[in-house]
Amino acid sequence: MEKVRVEREIGGQTFSLETGFIAKQAGACVIAQYGDSVVLNAVTSGSPREGIDFFPLMCDYRERFAAAGKFPGGFLKREGRPSTKDTLTSRLTDRPIRPLFPKGFHDEVMCQSTVVASDGLNDGDVIAMNGIAAALHISPLPFSGPIASVRIGRIDGQLVTFPTVEDLEESDLDMIVSGSLEEILMIEGFAREMPEEEMVEAILYAHEGIKQVCELQNELYGKCDVVKQEFVEPEDDGLADILIEKYSSDFKAAQLTEGKQNRADAVNVVKGRIKEDMIPDPEAEDAICSKALGAALYKLESKVIRQLIIEGTRPDGRSHDELRNIECHVDVLPRVHGSAVFQRGETQALVTVTLGTSKDEQRVDGITDTYSKKFMLDYNFPGYSVGEAKPNRGPGRREIGHGMLAERSVKAVLPDPEDFPYTIRVISDITESNGSSSQASVCGATLGLMAAGVPIKNPVAGISIGLVQEGDQNILLTDIQGAEDHFGDMDFKVAGTQKGITGIQLDLKINGISEQVIRDSLAQAKEARIEIMREMIRTIDRPRAETSQYAPRLIRVNIAPDKIGALIGPGGKNIRHIQESTGTVVEVDDEGTVTIASTNAEWAEEARGLVEAYTATVQVGKIYEGSISSIKDFGIFVEILPGRDGLCHISELSEHYISNISAAVNEGDVVKVKCIGVDDHDRVKLSRKAALEELGEEDDWEPQERSENDGERRERRPRRDGDRRGGGGGRRRRRD
């Protein structure tokens, strides 16, 4: 195949798709480029594994540091396990393409995207999503393309297609929308409390860009000699129809059992009876295959649940727009900085909040930049939450995806770091699950943050809207549970405040939904979200005024950047002294922002005083109280600031005659002095006499008698202004 390239200007830059040059042994390979960011996208397939009853689609996205001219961090200078960004993009790629393969198609399909060049402005994620979609479109696989994906931002009220990384820093919206020429297939987006109507406008705007990319893919398809693989869905053996006719009523009664576990037990009883009826003798020659019976039972269950919903009765007896029972609790754990439990139906999230300093920030090393995260939300889904006996193996793709959805949905309402400088970590442990656990994490995180004293701008709640589509009938379901998600057609998660949406995620099992379904879903989600928030604020109506007594107290002090050295001191002497003497943790950045952390407010204030003292500028005319650090014949040195001495000459010590300073004071004595000058070499001149005069205090030093040598000293003193060698050049006379 010869090289084929198509391109079109979209969003102010050229988007190109190219095939026939790289990876020619793959099933299909498309080089997708936007700006100077280039992603290699390869699709391969293999025969289905024996006995497989699902579609083993695998999407894998990887960023190579070499794409941006960087070396990976760490000891081994090569990429290792996929980063969080890689995992999230792999999920994004998978979600819109999976529904477009025919039912019953079980071939192994591998979609691999590698970022091979990055301009640091255009993210590779959406480029990869379009590259894989284009590769599937021109591949022999039975894929119902074209589909395309577009990122949308909004800057100063103006929607932007394919915003750059820099654009997104100024944008109040970051949303990726996937779709066909006719309908929307997938949404993943985050906003700063965007009203529903404006969100719909952004989705429709994105669809216009989607159409352009789809047309570009069709242009590529037209220039390639594409021969699509024929796929015929396996013939129905009619077993499912038999089960539906004979056992629908029994199955329906079991599905209406109250409680998830009781319902599962009732369903299993019916399934067991069906198995005994249909396969009385498993060893018989004409016995029904257990796998075939399992597939038929799945169709029976799907049929019954969907029919119940169409008839107006959900498995747990709720109406279509009714929420499950909600319970909210805070302060459920001792010692932690914040805790909460959010329960909706049989889904429960136990949330803990930890507050830390800048040392606790998470460093993220990416190909575009390296940055620190001050807010993290980790989602855990142990097996016991669904009654399964399985070990914890660390977070998988699902856990990472759900955690990031909750994290970014809550992030929009966090206070500015300048106002609340803590590093914040939220952990959501799903302790019970029957659907919508990610949105339970959003609600639980809000409760936990308010209990921890984090001054969030508004409470955030999340809800999931489901869909059962039969012909022209679209039935929307509020707060879907596990079975409704599994056998339904849509999972539309929406999180937000009373003002608007902060997080949105749409996943489908059908080939798309219309604008009207999107509008109705967002409206229904808003009603549910407001109702949930009412229950949440009954438990805690606002963030606590103070953080936990076990949380560090943070104080911020701004110093001039040229004073950083004075604060740190030689070899870290000064900052170490502050930390050791006050029991605090002191951090300073390159801009001069000093953060003091302590569990004791008094210690923190003491440390603040020392920081200010170490970095203070000596002011001429100001009176200081300091200790005498050393005594000389010609005067005393007084430490007026930590680490900063000044000289009080013998002539400025007292209004009385002083001949022997050591007889008047000792090292360590505290004296009041006035700064009377700072010379060009930053040497400080002090006066005790001037300080006493300004304060109106009496000089309590005793006068001293003059010695016989005093006159000699007074006679010799003026010679210092002239020729110290007395015109001779001989050695200076040694004092007796």
Image (tube, rainbow, N blue to C red):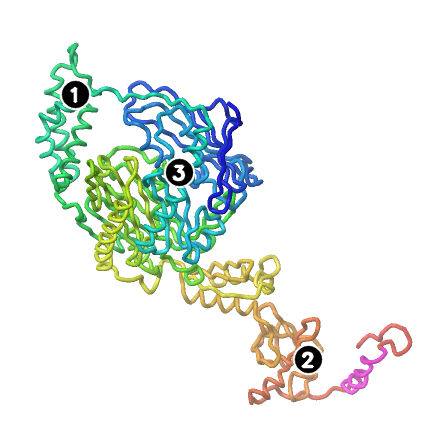
Residue 135: image quadrant is: top left
Please state the horizontal and vertical placement of residue 649, each as a whole percent of the image.
Answer: 68, 80
Q: Please say whether residue 719 is one of the residues in the magenta stretch.
A: yes
Residue at image mark 2: 649
| Rendering coords of residue 98 (x, y %) | 33, 32
Q: Which residue is mark 3?
A: 148
Instruction: Say whether marks 2 and 1 touch (CB < 8 Å).
Output: no
Front: mark 2 or 1:
1
Residue 473 is at least partly visible in this image = yes
Q: Residue shown at 28%/53% (left/top)?
A: 461
Q: Which of 200/300 is in front?
A: 200
Q: Which residue is mark 1?
A: 238
Looking at the rendered structure, the kind of residue marked 3 is Ala
Q: Amino acid at mark 2?
A: His
Q: Is residue 231 magenta?
A: no
User: How much space separates mark 3 and mark 1, taking CA atoms?
Assistant: 38 Å
State which tag comes first along the sequence, 3 or 1: 3
Q: Nearer the viewer, residue 668 or 435?
A: 435
